[in-house]
Image (spheres, rainbow, N blue to C red):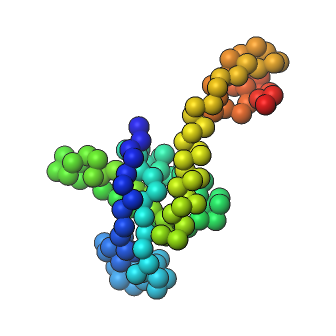
Amino acid sequence: MTLEVAPETWTRRQAGSWLPARLNEKLFQGAMERQMKTVYSASNISLVSIFQGILAGYGIRCWIKNEFLCAGIGEIPPIECWPLLCVDDDDFEEAKRIVDDALSDKDLPVWKCDACGEVIEGQFTECWNCGKRCPL
Ligand SMILES: [Zn+2]
């Protein structure tokens, strides 16, 4: 389950406000006043981590906000506890495009393995049954 989130602007000072100041400065390397925007959010931290990895693969630095906030569920509305994947304002357009591209892969058509005849969902590039790659 994913949620479209209005781009939220916040600073790294806010992001690290729960950290000891020395560690906070080390993590955020003096660029604390630069703006960050939310590029993706989901109820599942694993999904957010996957997109963090994808963006990192493109060389885009990103941070997860609310990573540990799920402990507050019950007192805070659940959606406000969802982890947020945030990037520098300067990287937002490219990051958003990459995330949207990755999400749209879910709409790929199913394909039939030409080795074993198994029907495979479009997001998979290999046959789960025999390991042969998608012919496309
Ligand atoms: Zn196969």
Residue 99 x/y as whole percent: 55, 50
Q: Quadrant of the C terminus?
A: top right
Q: Quadrant of the N terminus?
A: top left
Residue 6 occupies quadrant: bottom left
Seen from the viewer's position, the closer of residues 30 and 108 is 108
State the residue lying farthest toward the left: 75
In the image, 86: left or right of 76? Answer: right
Residue 125 x/y as whole percent: 71, 33
Above or below, comparing residue 3 to residue 122 in the picture? below
Residue 88 x/y as whole percent: 49, 70
At 50% across and 52% down in the image, what residue appears?
49
Above or below, comparing residue 34 to residue 58 in the picture? below
Seen from the viewer's position, the closer of residues 3 and 24 is 3
In the image, 9: left or right of 119? Answer: left
At 41% across and 50% down in the image, what residue appears?
41
At 37% across and 74% down in the image, what residue appears?
11
Q: Is residue 16 visible?
A: no
Above or below, comparing residue 123 to residue 12 in the picture? above
At 68% across and 17% down in the image, what residue appears?
119
Seen from the viewer's position, the closer of residues 11 and 131 is 11
Seen from the viewer's position, the closer of residues 75 and 90 is 90
Q: Is residue 25 visible?
A: yes
